[in-house]
Amino acid sequence: VLRVGSNYFAKFVAYSSGLPILIVAVALIFNLIDDEDSIFNPNMEKTCWITGNATAWIYGFGLGLILLLANVGLLSATWASGEPV
């Protein structure tokens, strides 16, 4: 089914490009925080991996969860509208 509308493709581009850019920008800002005791500091200068539970959630699991919930929400909205997926 071919979708008609000028904003249809723009919504896909905004989501598929905008959300990763936003995530990278937020992670970069958090990475530039110089406070070593902050939960936003990944402390990757000392080890090869993220240390600490809160930091792992911020940089790893939390981002994946945000993307998963956003995709499930968009799929649910499409399903609720009655349009073919």
Image: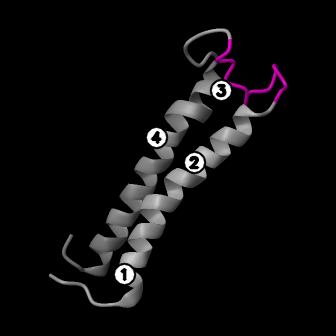
Q: Amino acid at mark 3?
A: Ala
User: Mark 4 or mark 3, which has the lower sequence index?
Assistant: 3
Secondary structure of the residue carrying numbered label 2: helix
- For disc 3, the marked residue is 54
Q: Is residue 24 above or below residue 21?
A: above
Secondary structure of the residue carrying numbered label 1: helix
Contact (CB < 8 A) between labels 4 and 1?
Answer: no
Is label 2 or label 3 in front? 2
What range of the chain is rendered magenta? Answer: 34-45
Contact (CB < 8 A) between labels 2 and 3?
Answer: no
Q: Amino acid at mark 2?
A: Ile
- For disc 1, the marked residue is 8
Mark 1 neighbour density, 10 Å: few (under 14) some (14–19) many (20 or more) = few
Q: Nearer the viewer, residue 41 or 78?
A: 41
Q: Is residue 85 above or below residue 34?
A: below
Q: Give how far apart the Cα atoms at labels 3 and 1 are.
A: 38 Å
Contact (CB < 8 A) between labels 4 and 3?
Answer: no
User: Mark 2 or mark 1, which has the lower sequence index?
Assistant: 1
Q: Amino acid at mark 1?
A: Tyr
Secondary structure of the residue carrying numbered label 4: helix
- For disc 2, the marked residue is 23
Marks counted in the figure total 4
The picture places residue 14, in percent across and down from the top left corner, at 48, 68
Q: Residue at x 38, y 65 (%)?
A: 74
The picture places residue 57, in percent across and down from the top left corner, at 58, 31
The picture places residue 21, in percent across and down from the top left corner, at 55, 53
Which image quadrant: the N terminus?
Answer: bottom left
Secondary structure of the residue carrying numbered label 3: helix
Q: Give how far apart the Cα atoms at labels 4 and 3 are.
A: 14 Å
Q: Residue at x 42, y 77 (%)?
A: 10
